[in-house]
Image (cartoon, helix red, strand yellow):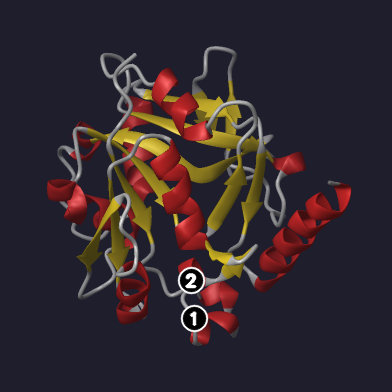
């Protein structure tokens, strides 16, 4: 096991087309749940896991993202501006000079609740840099809030994920939360590319691992997902 990463990246550059019409005026990472933006929720959880510097990429409504983050003091937050959208993988590759050898990456439209241990700490504990280039956090599709897809991965008992094929239904979805090593980007010449290219490359080399989240996970990528997330969290308050 290696030391937990001290740097992280939050992907916040997308246009959020599935969140329209809400995202026409507010970028998805600045949508509020329980009185805090999704972006702040993610930064707070990264800070709890020991992260000291968070890099946030920005393209769509970048000035709103930057203005919001200007008020944060801990951890250190740096903006990685993108003049053109670089997609998820390209965005991380562009920000590599600001990141450590290993780092967390979190999508800007997800929210999660930890169980006994921090999910990010569990990722760090599962990461063996001698054998792995990345660890993905998966969630059981049947327990995901705001999700109605066919899943993303199967997972064997050793923690080796297999991406589902076209007509399959997989029991686990990828949460958009991960720990990556910078060498996972070696040899990728494209400027714009998806992180799926990184996962598939690591998988083919036998260097991709995954663990299953033991808390709740919320997909806030659509108006329906946002409504479901707010309702679920409101029910927690009622239960308490």
Image-based side of 135 in relation to 214, left or right: left
Say how many tags the image has.
Answer: 2
Q: Quadrant of residue 35?
A: bottom right
Residue most toward the right? Answer: 239
Neighbours of disc 2 within 10 Å: few (<14), some (14-19), many (20+): some
Whether 88 is drawn above or below 33: the answer is above
Image-based side of 231 in relation to 211, left or right: right
Q: Position of residue 230 (x, y in %)?
A: 72, 63
Instruction: State the residue position of label 1.
Output: 26
Query: How far apart are the alpha carbons under marks 1 and 2?
Result: 6 Å
Q: Position of residue 185 (x, y in %)?
A: 21, 40
For the point 42% across and 48% down, which residue is it?
106
For the point 58% across and 18% down, which residue is it?
156
Q: Are marks 1 and 2 in contact (CB under 8 Å)?
A: yes
Q: Is residue 196 visible?
A: no
Q: Quadrant of the N terminus?
A: top left
Image-based side of 182 in relation to 1, left or right: left
Q: Quadrant of residue 50?
A: top left
Q: Is residue 53 visible?
A: yes
Mark number, residue 30:
2
For the point 23% across and 74% down, which residue is it?
84
In front of the other: 240 or 181: 240
In front of the other: 3 or 76: 76
Neighbours of disc 1 within 10 Å: few (<14), some (14-19), many (20+): some
In front of the other: 17 or 202: 17
Secondary structure type for disc 1: loop
Mark number, residue 88:
none
Image-based side of 43 in relation to 232, left or right: left
């Amino acid at each position: 096991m290696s030391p937990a990463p001290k740097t992280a990246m939050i992907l916040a550059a997308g246009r959020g087309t599935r969140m329209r019409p809400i995202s026409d005026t507010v970028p998805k990472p600045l949508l509020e749940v329980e009185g805090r933006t999704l972006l702040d929720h993610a930064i707070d959880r990264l800070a709890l896991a020991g992260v000291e510097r968070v890099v946030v990429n920005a393209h769509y409504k970048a000035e709103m993202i930057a203005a919001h983050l200007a008020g944060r003091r801990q951890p250190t937050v740096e903006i990685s501006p993108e003049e053109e959208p670089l997609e998820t993988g390209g965005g991380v590759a562009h920000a590599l000079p600001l990141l450590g050898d290993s780092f967390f990456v979190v999508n800007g439209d997800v929210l999660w609740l930890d169980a006994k241990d921090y999910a990010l700490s569990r990722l760090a504990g599962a990461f063996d840099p001698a054998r792995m280039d990345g660890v993905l956090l998966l969630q059981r599709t049947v327990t995901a809030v705001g999700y109605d897809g066919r899943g993303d991965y199967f997972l064997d008992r050793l923690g080796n994920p297999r991406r589902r094929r076209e007509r399959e239904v997989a029991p686990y979805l990828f949460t958009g939360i991960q720990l990556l090593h910078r060498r996972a980007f070696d040899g990728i010449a494209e400027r714009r590319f998806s992180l799926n290219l990184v996962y598939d490359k690591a998988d083919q080399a036998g260097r991709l691992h995954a663990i299953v989240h033991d808390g709740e996970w919320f997909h806030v990528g659509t108006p329906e997902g946002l409504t479901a997330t707010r309702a679920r969290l409101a029910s927690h308050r009622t239960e308490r």
